[in-house]
Amino acid sequence: MKTFAPRALQEVRFESTVVEALPADPRTENVPRQVPEAAYTFVTPTPVATPRLLAWSDDLAERLGLVRPSSVGAAVDILAGNTLAPGMRPYAARYGGHQFGNWAGQLGDGRAITLGELIAVDGSRQELQLKGAGPTPYSRFADGRAVLRSSLREFLCSEAMHHLGVPTTRALSLVATGEPVVRDMFYDGHPQPEPGAIVCRVAPTFIRFGNFEIHSAADEHAVLRRLVEHVIRAHYPQFDAADPAAPAAWFAEICRRTAVMIAHWMRVGFVHGVMNTDNMSILGLTLDYGPYGWLEGYDPQWTPNTTDASGRRYCYGNQPQIGLWNLARLAGALLPIIEDHDALHQGLELYRSVYHSTWQGLLAAKLGLDRIEGEDDTALVDDLFSLMAAVETDMPILFRGLGDDLDEDESGLIERVVRPALYEGADLSQDLMARWQAWFARWRRRGEASGLAKGERQRRMNANNPCYVPRNYLAQRAIDAATEGNLEPLEELLTVLRNPYERQSGRESYAARRPEWARHRAGCSALSCSS
Ligand code: AMP
Ligand code: MG
């Protein structure tokens, strides 16, 4: 491993393997248009009035070998798109996608601009991308900007997911632009100016399923092949890009990673909200934090996205199925270059089996068991979810309680685990109480039969059932304060979420149920796509 002293962002020398490996759009004028045959278009971020750093990830910066900048200055100017660091050749990527089940044609980075790649402390290559840095040829009818509320939510959730152990893209910085952005938040014909902000996102690459789909749909098979080879070379070195069998094996690996990612979403109760194929990372990382949400009351039909409320395509319980559907679209896009169609089917089958085994493993850990196997175990799990669905019961609180209060008897578990998880109006009838007691007794017997020591069971449970998740209303509180110029609630929330599996004294309220006032408030439960 290379060791070097942390450096200021403006001193980093950037590179771009994408620019080296893939064809650029020969045109550079920054007007909305269809772009043929190219993987990206060179475009410079549009400068903003008065950039100021609002949040920073020390943990990520340490990995990147960067020093924390002060709130204004050279580094923040780069993070706002006002200047470039050496070697940066910014571009917007061209991609397409299936949105809500339909082919949407060319989409592309409408408000994201990649600055370049740097070599991190561990030798890995990491791409820095600004979201909200101004229009690109892919902006279509929109402005290329992002509002503070959505940018803060992206920053916060990127941090939370990383510390929860869910594969995710990361966020390095949140910068206020000092410029208003006009949005019609409720789509009710009342646009309002809101503060603008820019997130600097970081991942080895932001290439999505949609990048492959656009070349395939446009019959650009040579570019498609170059893209596949580039991604294998740069990001899947375990495969030999020159081997004709590599693309099929690579596709299977994408299926595997996507399955693991979605199983973790299910474990922590994350609902992405817009699982369009243009939002699916080719690395199996959670990508594009928009109208996402966290399952509070357990309801598999729940979706945080108001645009999805009628169809519920992207609700919590559908996510595993949608992952498969999206991979099938990627498989379809790869048909022109992967002749072995059986291999593609096997990849999709692998998704099913990896999802199943990963989810069963995570469930076993969540319940402090050695494994979930056979009809009795399946019934134990199904019955738990039925009990949680019977009346509105908070999923994170319920699961966390199981590990924290493992020593309680059945009535103790009801008082200490079930009751604190019940929302207002969720009545624990005699019948429901009896069903919970019976379930706890079965779970206890099964736990004793697992052969695991009590301490080990508790350790597994508490390492998989977070105390703290970024409940939407907590994010909204931080947004409201930040909008007023007070960053303390955001900083405290970030501190809590950076250590989500450990009870933090004095921070009990962060682990509690969403208060009733937040149930129907904008941003506190459901969200629109307006961002
Ligand atoms: P999303 O649903 O946020 O993943 O966005 C879908 C597409 O719309 C992507 O191509 C985005 O780049 C584009 N888009 C979303 N918001 C904006 C915006 N404010 N300006 C330009 N393009 C946008
Ligand atoms: Mg997107």
Image (tube, rainbow, N blue to C red):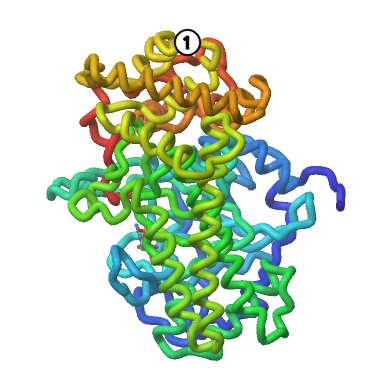
Callout 1: helix, strand or loop? Answer: loop
Residue 177 visible? The answer is no
Tell me if mark 1 has few (under 14), some (14-19) or many (20+) residues whose alpha carbon lies within 10 angstroms of its own: few
Is 267 on the left or on the right of 304, as rendered? right
Q: Residue at x 33, y 24 (%)?
A: 514
For mark 1, what is the residue?
Answer: 409
Judge whether 361 appears above or below 369 on screen.
below
Q: Nearer the viewer, residue 418 or 212?
A: 418
> What percent of the width, then of the height, locates residue 417?
42, 17
Q: Position of residue 370 (x, y in %)?
A: 61, 36
Tally of marks: 1
Q: Percent from the top left, x then y, of residue 497?
A: 53, 30
Q: Is residue 13 left or right of residue 348?
A: right
Residue at image x 35%, y 55%? 274
Tag 1: amino acid = Asp
To which quarter of the image does residue 519 belong?
top left
Q: Is residue 404 above or below residue 337?
A: above
Q: Could one spot residue 326 in this view of the protein?
A: yes
Residue 446 is situated, as x and y percent measured from the top left of the image, at: 53, 28
230 up-or-down from 142: above or below: below
Q: Is residue 78 left or right of residue 380?
A: right
